[in-house]
Structure formats: structure tokens, C-alpha cells
Image (tube, rainbow, N blue to C red):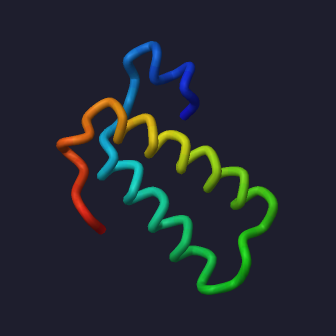
Amino acid sequence: MSSEAASRGTVRSAADVNKDIRALAKGAWGRPFTDEERAAYDLLVVEWADAVQAKPHAVEAA
């Protein structure tokens, strides 16, 4: 999700985004990300940052 989506009020929780990040990493099984996976990861990190900024008190350590 981009900052554009965040501005529309469609921010998922940081915990939900973190689950997607973990699933992506687990799917790679320790190998380097493909270009497609790297792009997805980069978008998820931006979405996670948006979620943290939206609700900083709701972030839980991994």
C-alpha cells in the first residue's frame, strides 16, 4: 500500500502488514528475494511504516 492509500484512510494495522512480511520472507526459504518479491517487500515496508505512523501506540514488537 502506498501513502496515497493511507491518505484515503485504508491503512491496515502494522500487525496485519507484519504478517504479510513474515509470510513473504518464509516463502523465500532463506534464498534471496526475486525481483517480484523484492518489489512486494518494499511496498509492504512502506505500508507498515504508514500503519506505524497512523497508530504508533499500537505497534507490538515482533
In this rendering, the answer to whether 14 lies above or below 9 is: below
Point 35% across, 41% down: residue: 52
Which quarter of the rendered picture does the N terminus lie within? top right
Which quarter of the rendered picture does the C terminus lie within? bottom left
Left-right relation of 1 to 48: right
Left-right relation of 33 to 12: right
Left-right relation of 21 to 43: left
Residue 27, by quadrant, is bottom right
| Residue 15, x across and y down, in percent | 30, 52
| Residue 21, x across and y down, in percent | 48, 60
Point 38% across, 59% down: residue: 19
Left-right relation of 21 to 53: right
| Residue 50, x across and y down, in percent | 44, 35
Point 71% across, 59% down: residue: 38
Point 81% across, 60% down: residue: 35
Q: Which residue extends farthest bottom? A: 30
Residue 44 vs residue 61, the one in the foreground: 61
Q: Which residue extends farthest top? A: 8
| Residue 43, x across and y down, in percent | 61, 44
Residue 11, by quadrant, is top left
In this rendering, the answer to whether 1 lies above or below 25 is: above
